[in-house]
Amino acid sequence: MINREHYLKEIRGFYDSDLIKIIVGVRRCGKSIILEQIKKEISKKTDNIIYLNFEDEEVSANIYNSEKLIEYVNNNRKDGKCYIFLDEIQEVKDWNKAVKTLRLHDNSVFITGSNSKLLAKEYTDAFSGRYVTFRIRPFVYKEILEYAKELKKECSISDYLVWGGFPKRLEFNEKDMITYLKDLNESIIFRDLIIRFKINNEELFRRIVNYVLLSNSRIFSSRSIEDYLKNEHIKCSINTIIKYLGYLEKAYVINRIKPYSSKTKSELTYYFKIYDEDVSFNSLRNINNRYDLTHNLENVVYNELIYMGYGLKVFNKSDDDKEIDFIASKDGKEYYIQVAYSVENESTYNREFGAFTKLDNNNQKILITNDDIDYSTSTVKHLKLKDFLLMSSLEDMDN
């Protein structure tokens, strides 16, 4: 497995801290691998390390509650600072009590857990601010290329736009990959959500999930989802829709960003744009290989920009109802970014470039498409998707 330095450098400064280090993210995005890579780094300076994976029956059968966990650590740690790695910690009864105790006794504690048990409210209540979290995400394209090379395989941009970045899927042929992704999807929806939140109306929940994940990269409101359900002759309250969307966010399945209105100079409270954590969530729900490359491309751009560290908003020019896909902000710089699959067609070209009309030139205007031709103008920089996916920052445009 590749070394995920992008995340390790964020965590490295906390290796010796008494804060509890919590690794979070959607199921199978690589949290356990990050834990192992941290352990490998620390092992270069000390062997005072304890690593427990509670998915291992030999471990969970003997260490099943907080008392047993504390007892095991005290019997196996050495003098001096001990580094404790607890993978899938939710299998231990009252695990939060054990972790709170362990951090007080010269231990540096790292934990991961299934999103069915280890979610924001749980560790907020359990640790009262004595923790730091690190969000891990599926592979971006640069990581996919690196891992594919390690596996002596290839992965095209088209493959990425359809099947996304869950690391392990690269290890299979296409048929087995789809089976793996379907099983992963079901595990997330069923184990991490339906069981975790005790959802009684499973059919309704699945209908809403399918609709939302198929509608990535689009402007939503809870009311618009309610209207969709009404058209399908399905009754559901706004409160239930809001609750279900919250569940999807807590399990890191979707991300929501709000439009920013140029007219009111504020966020539009009741509207939001949804992006899937991984575009495979969309593709698995399409039939007859009719994959939604247009919206998946924008979703991929969203994921890549987040990985680069940009804060994102949708820019809604209220005066003419035109929308800029992203305002990307970092280090005091802002970029206006529009995304399209192609602008080869004249009407599409006019629409996408027209979105920048009436915007000042104080911020860089960028259009990202899958075209091979450079369509840059005097005011808009065109980025080819194949070039954008290899950038570490938008400032690379100037290099």
Image (spheres, helix red, strand yellow):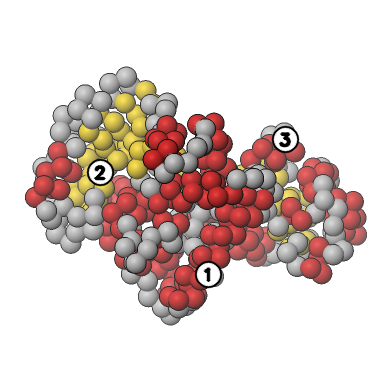
Point out the residue furthest to the top here.
264
Given the image, on which type of amino acid does mark 1 rest?
A: Tyr
Q: What element carries label 3?
A: helix
| Badge number at residue 180 | 1
Can you tell which quarter of the image residue 153 is in? bottom left
Q: How crowded is mark 3: few (under 14 residues within 10 Å), some or many (20 or more)?
A: few
x and y percent of residue 352 in the render? Answer: 18, 43
Disc 3 versus disc 2: distance between alpha carbons?
Answer: 40 Å
- Name the N-terminal-most of marks 1 and 2: 1
Nearest-to-viewer mark from 1 and 2: 1
Read off the residue under disc 2. Answer: 338
- Name the N-terminal-most of marks 1 and 3: 3
Residue occupying image coordinates x 79% and y 68%: 57
Q: Dots 1 and 2: beta carbons under 8 Å?
A: no
Disc 1 versus disc 3: distance between alpha carbons?
Answer: 34 Å
Disc 1 versus disc 2: distance between alpha carbons?
Answer: 33 Å
Asked whether, in this view, residue 276 is left or right of residue 336, the answer is right
Read off the residue under disc 3. Answer: 125
